[in-house]
Image: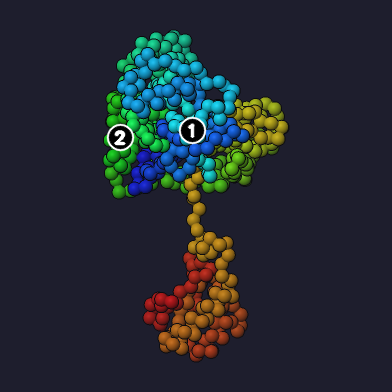
Amino acid sequence: MEKELIIKSTDSEVEIALLEDKRLVEYHTEKKNHQYAVGDVFLGRVHKIMPGLNAAFVNLGGDKDAFLHYLDLGPQFATQTKFMHRAMSGDPAMRTLANFKFENPTQKIGKISETVKSGQFVLVQVDKEPISTKGPKVGGEISFAGHYLVLVPFSNRISISQKIKSVAERNRLRRLIQSIRPENFGIIVRTNAEGKSVAELDADLRSLQNRWIQLVQNLKNATFAQKLVSEENKTSVILRDVLTDDFSSIYTDSPELYETARNYIQALAPEKTDIVKLYKMSTPIFDQFGVQKQIRSSFGRIVTIRSGVYLVIEHTEAMNVIDVNSGNHTKAGENQEETAMRVNTDAAIEIARQLRLRDMGGIVIIDFIDMQKNENRKQLFQTMVDEMAKDKAQHTILPVNKFGLIQITRQRVRPVIDVDVQERCPMCDGKGTIKSSLAIVDEIESNIKYLFNVQNEKKLTILTHPYIHAYLTKGLMSRRTKLCRKYHKIIKINPDSNLSLADYKFFNKNGEEIEM
């Protein structure tokens, strides 16, 4: 599979499109002045304790307080709080955590009011960005994600991705990580680490340790709620999460992002540095690679699939609902069951793409076309599972129920991407109604009176929509004839199908258009 990353930069935001075999599968936007991003680490101050929710609202120094639930404090919250106070006092030993003594783990079942107090400083990391009217959701467990590894402070555990199946490879990675793991730091080995050398893993670990050192330095003498460590920019995050050996090219129209991407890949895979290219053509980068056209056709309430099937996608506060419609999809020789199976299969493939593309999270309910055969339902479910396997977000899929519904829960950490692909109607200005034909005719007659009586025109030619033309000219004693007799002047009215119903144009005897 050929993968391309297209990065468009403007003054206010960065847009990133991931193409697989020239097809848009992921679309990300990042405002350049955004307050919160998943992975940002903050020194927060507890603003309010909510015993009924067993949670607290934490001031992060921004517009909205963050939500911190007791269950998200993490088992080493007391240890982390101890570290925070020592780092704020400038203790240099906190850079390595060597010989750092852990406190007793936080109980799994407990009360937030007995663990934190109003006004207390807490070290938290953003787990979910603000969604709708809600502020960000934060947790007390800090971690730093790299391309191959995840660094977890206050732990001594090594975890290997379950997607690495080879027992020999898992054992090799465990031995390598054990040899380079710093004391009191746990390591999670990501799928991308499979087959990588100790030098590559060590380089990734060093970059993560540098972020930890940055956190310690910024904590020193910190006095108020503030951001301590920012997550990497969206370009680096996408590269970190999706960069694989089958990536063929990365294009960007920003010299700054070109250098960022090039330096990032230089550190990870020097042999692939040349896939980063600076786009310099005059045609907008998204137009050149067909991204803009795919965005227009892939977003919106109704999404048409190539085979004629279409989806209706509705977003609500609590869930997302997708309805599958067959449209005019028929094929000679197929019965109703075969048609439903074919339509549902096409829809399942597109729905899996839409979930990634829009980054839809939470509960997703899909209403497929009813099928009678149990084996067809099982096959549809397997198709959905296979297509969703390409999605890196955590998700759970339930089998087709007796109502023909499939329920999916997908990790929700950011607001759903919703691109407005509709334009305001130039005739009604988005109101859904336009001026009546009688009012348009009255307006035309009023202009005729002005042009003859005030502007002293000798002859008029009028272009109108065919419907208005018919209204003015049909009949033995048409309105045009009456107007000619009234003013004793020549009036020609010609139809123009290129004009909208409410538009018309006047021309004088020399064929020059008269501005009204």
In the picture provided, is 492 more to the left or to the right than 2? right
Residue 281: x percent and y percent?
Answer: 29, 46
Q: Secondary structure at mark 2?
A: helix
Closer to the camera, 99 or 286?
99
- Crowdedness of circle 1 by 10 Å Cα count: few (<14), some, many (20+)? many
Q: Residue, x 49% and y 40% (percent of image)?
A: 65
Residue 146: x percent and y percent?
Answer: 38, 25
Closer to the camera, 446 or 170?
170
Residue 494: x percent and y percent?
Answer: 49, 75
Q: Residue, x 52% and y 21% (percent of image)?
A: 106
In the picture provided, is 511 more to the left or to the right than 444? left
Can residue 55 be seen at all in this image of the molecule? yes
Q: Is residue 260 above or below residue 382?
A: below
Mark 1 residue type: Val
Mark 2 residue type: Thr
- Crowdedness of circle 2 by 10 Å Cα count: few (<14), some, many (20+)? some
Q: Residue, x 56% and y 67% (percent of image)?
A: 434
* Residue, disc 2: 260
Closer to the camera, 463 or 377?
377
* Residue, disc 1: 138
Q: Is residue 452 above or below residue 96?
A: below
Q: Residue, x 56% and y 70% (percent of image)?
A: 435
